[in-house]
Amino acid sequence: MRKLLLGLDIGSSSVKASLLDADLGRAIVSKAFPEEEMPIDAPETGWAEQDPEMWWTYVKQTIQFVLKKAEVKTGELKGIGIAYQMHGLVLVDKNHQVLRPSIIWCDSRAVSIGDQAFQALGSEYCLPHLLNSPGNFTASKLRWVMENEPEVAAKIHKIMLPGDFIAMKLSGEILTSETGLSEGIFWDFKANGLSKPLLKQMGISESLIPDAVPSFSIQGKVTVEASKETGIEAGVPIAYRAGDQPNNAFSLNVLKPGELATTAGTSGTVYGVCDTPLYDPESRVNTFVHVNHAAKAPSYGVLLCVNGTGILNSWLKRVMGGARISYEEMNSLGGSAPIGSDGLVFIPFGNGVERIMRNKPVGAHLLGLDLLKHDKRHLIRSAQEGIVCALTYGFRIMKDMGMNLKTVKAGHANMFLSPLFRKTFVHMNQVNLELYDTDGAQGAARGAGIGVGLYHSEAEAFQGLQLLETVEPNTNFYEPYEEAYHHWENRLKEVM
């Protein structure tokens, strides 16, 4: 009998499910729904909301698809892992009913609330204890609801992150994790527990916060009702949960100090692991509990995030003709333009406030356009270069914190499918890039394998992970890419 593991990745663009054969260490079937991107509602400028029940609808569709495609038999599915878009706020009442749309990761409405909390608590507390400013994270979003929607706040039984909500729908239990509490800025790293000063300052009752479970652990089992809705056999355990960036790092076997992972989906990230609680004094990059953190063996993840990444690329595709041009054609066109795009600069910050910009609404800008010289080749290249320049801006903050950035791992997906993007990333940052055949859903499945005890070590869990390609920097290209970066940085100063 096969031993199968199900991984779910709850994104803001789509929901993906992967079935992993635990013995082979390979995915046997994967599927994402919907075919087009999920809608994000913006009732006001800077807001971003999604209906959690929409996620659940697509979770059910993806699960039903992969179970049917793989012809899963009774007893074969051993565990479920859940990865999810970080920082979102889900509110439910005592009957587990959703009270309002989720305020998701790229929503900017709570920036001022986080700033006020930082001033009230002081940097002397926030930086060593929270490793961050409260910023625009989940705690600040909850406070916004309390201040602006008191009738909703009065009905709150528990708050959750998106992955906690999906776990609740599957198991009927409301739980979270230490990684989740840290990403919401509820976690005191020195006290190794909830931040009582933060809760007091924001007027948040501790009773609203779910109990925390380890990332790798039995966290509930599929109920009879959820079994009828999904097709999963009742009693299958949920055995892993983590936010998308810690999970992406885990999916690439990035677990030890000095190792780094990167993504370039809707947002672009670099995530580095360390064993000491590093922090940026300006909270431009953020430190969270990593999935393998333990009191006796601490593990932290430092996250650099650029919101305007794949979303810029998809926007560009739409304005260039949508279905009439493919991403492959765009990558080829952009690659034919020279390094630096003949002076055309794209500032990609058009998807909410950016942390590396100190939560300022910088916006997206196209600068230096010459109508007699520039064409779609330059436009495409400047967009991809602009995204890499923004990541490089954050990279240099991480280096200043003392992080060693030499080799970065990524899944062979999203913008890393573009040769132009890969080369720009490698040469501008002078790093080796390792590309693997994996994704967040596969990582969540491997996590479930550890959680249920099918894998007895992390090394065993990653025996089937395939390295597809290594891209190394050519020192001959360092100067032109460095020149392009400094030109981009100078133009950025003009719009800040």
Image: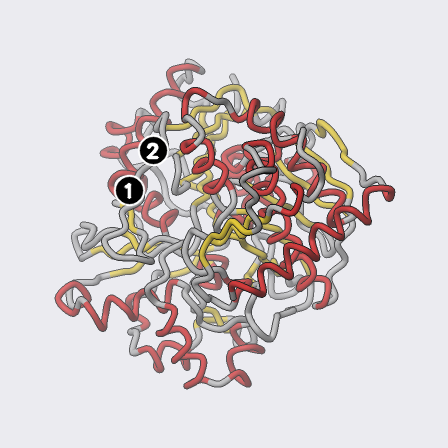
Q: Position of residue 92 (x, y in %)?
A: 22, 55
Q: Residue at x 52, y 76 (%)?
A: 191
Q: Is residue 209 above or below residue 81?
A: below
Q: CA distance from mark 1 to mark 2?
A: 10 Å
Q: Is residue 253 visible?
A: no
- Asked whether, in this view, residue 110 is left or right of residue 189, the answer is left
- Disc 2 element: helix
Q: Amino acid at mark 2?
A: Val
Q: Earlier in the sequence, mark 1 or mark 2?
A: 2
> Which residue is at the front of the view, 451 or 441?
441
The answer to which of 294 and 441 lies nearer the viewer is 441
Residue 455: x, y in percent?
61, 36
Colour mapping used in the image: secondary structure
Residue located beneath label 1 in the image = 169
The quarter of the picture where residue 334 lies is: top right
Query: Of helix, strand and loop, which one carries label 1?
Result: helix
Asked if the residue at tag 2 contacts the one at tag 1, i.e. Cβ–Cβ closer than 8 Å, the answer is yes
At label 1, which amino acid type do we have? Lys
Between circles 1 and 2, the one closer to the viewer is 2
Residue 222 at x, y percent in the picture: 33, 37
Residue placed under numbered mark 2 in the picture: 59
